[in-house]
Image (cartoon, rainbow, N blue to C red):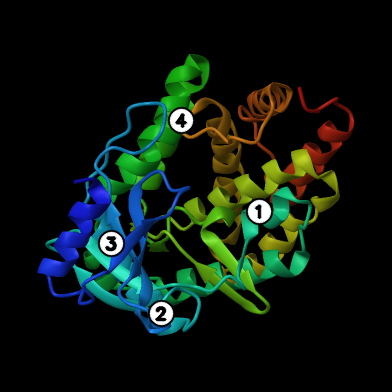
Amino acid sequence: MNESDNFLELLRRDGHIHHPHARLVPLTGGVSSEICIVEDGPDPSARYVVKRALKKLKVKDDWFADVSRNASEWRYIEFVGGILPGSVPKLRYVSEQGGYFAMELLSGDFANWKQLMLQGDGRMDHARMAGRMMSDIHHQSRGNAELHARFDTTANFHQLRMEPYLLTTGQRNPDLEPLFTAEVDRIESTRTALVHGDFSPKNILINGDRMVLLDCEVAWYGDPVFDAAFLLTHLFLKTLLHPECNGIALAFWLTYAPSLPPTESASFESNLVRLLLMLLLARVDGKSPAEYLTASQQQFVRSFTRKHLPGPPHTLSELCTLWHSEISNTTVSGD
């Protein structure tokens, strides 16, 4: 019996599967969870998605994480669905003991934002939609003691983000390691708002004016700078493939930034620029490299980040200008 059959039997024993010929159809693409479409009979309403966290992630390097993150994910969906209906999938049922939950299956009318940008479709409206969604989540969760307690998941965040992205990259660039270690300490000592932790285009579906955020298992009450820097990393990298999309990063930021408290705005942006540079390098030298970059593009990222990390610009606008200027003055092509 394979893993899908075992999972199906678990769902049947727990009372969630009823049709005698029900089946699970595994979905591909994720590295951290087992994700399947449930087909519990011919009725379209009996088709939905079920997700269970994996102990060992499906990447080249050894990368392990606590499966209790599954509960953090459905709790994040529960909270965000309450403040921004439609921006996350609807939950159907959860099993904290079984380490899984079920949610609505979104139709084929939705497009994946990452795939759109890889094809050169870098619409400013999409970046603004993401900026509004992120700012709403961060703003409405700021200073919330109940969420702080519910998402006290620093150990999980460390396993899934700090260690594979920042600490590993620092170890592989020893001269920069003190900077990376200090940044991990700064991030993990910050408790400001609810953080998604994987706010990236691959986890965003778009259908007209509806944007849906997926894969919330890294959810943590901590430093919102991480979400903004993580998304901007992806937006920057896409312009290596399609320079004509070079306005999407600022479109996101100019939508997100007005929600910041005036007393925190300057320090937030300074921390954002520094962390963005580190995460760019991490997408080349960390445990989760961007699979679409060629060797010459990877080398450009290394050269750019190593040049600017010791003394980062103070604003994102300055960093964007430097990034696009150096791309235009450098041969960054396929191999």
- Is label 4 or label 2 in front? 2
Pointers 1 and 4 in contact (C-beta within 8 Å):
no
Numbered badge on residue 81: 2
10 Å neighbourhood of mark 2: few (<14), some, or many (≥20)? Answer: some
Sequence order check, earlier mark of 3 and 1: 3
Q: Pick whichever of labels 2 and 3 is earlier in the sequence.
A: 3
- Asked whether, in this view, residue 193 is left or right of residue 259, the answer is left
Q: Determine which of the numbered discs, if any, sits on residue 55 in the image.
A: none
CA separation in Å, label 4 and label 3: 26 Å
What residue is at 26 percent from the left and 41 percent from the top? 65
- Which mark is on residue 72? 3
C-alpha gap between disc 2 and disc 1: 25 Å
Of mark 1 and mark 4, the one earlier in the sequence is 1
- Disc assigned to residue 115: 1
Q: What type is the residue that disc 4 sits on?
A: Phe
In front: label 3 or label 1: 1
Mark positioned earlier in the residue sequence (4 or 2): 2
Amino acid under disc 3: Ser
- Judged by depth in the image, the label closer to the viewer, 1 or 4, is 1
Q: Looking at numbered disc 1 in the image, what kind of residue is underneath it? A: Gln
The x and y percentages for residue 181 are 40, 30
Q: Is residue 191 visible?
A: no
* Residue 158 sits above or below residue 71 on the image: above
Q: Residue at x 18, y 66 (%)?
A: 11
Label 4 environment density (alpha carbons within 10 Å; few <14, some 14–19, many ≥20): many
- Indicate the position of residue 307 as horizontal and vertical percent values: 69, 24
Disc ID at residue 180 = 4
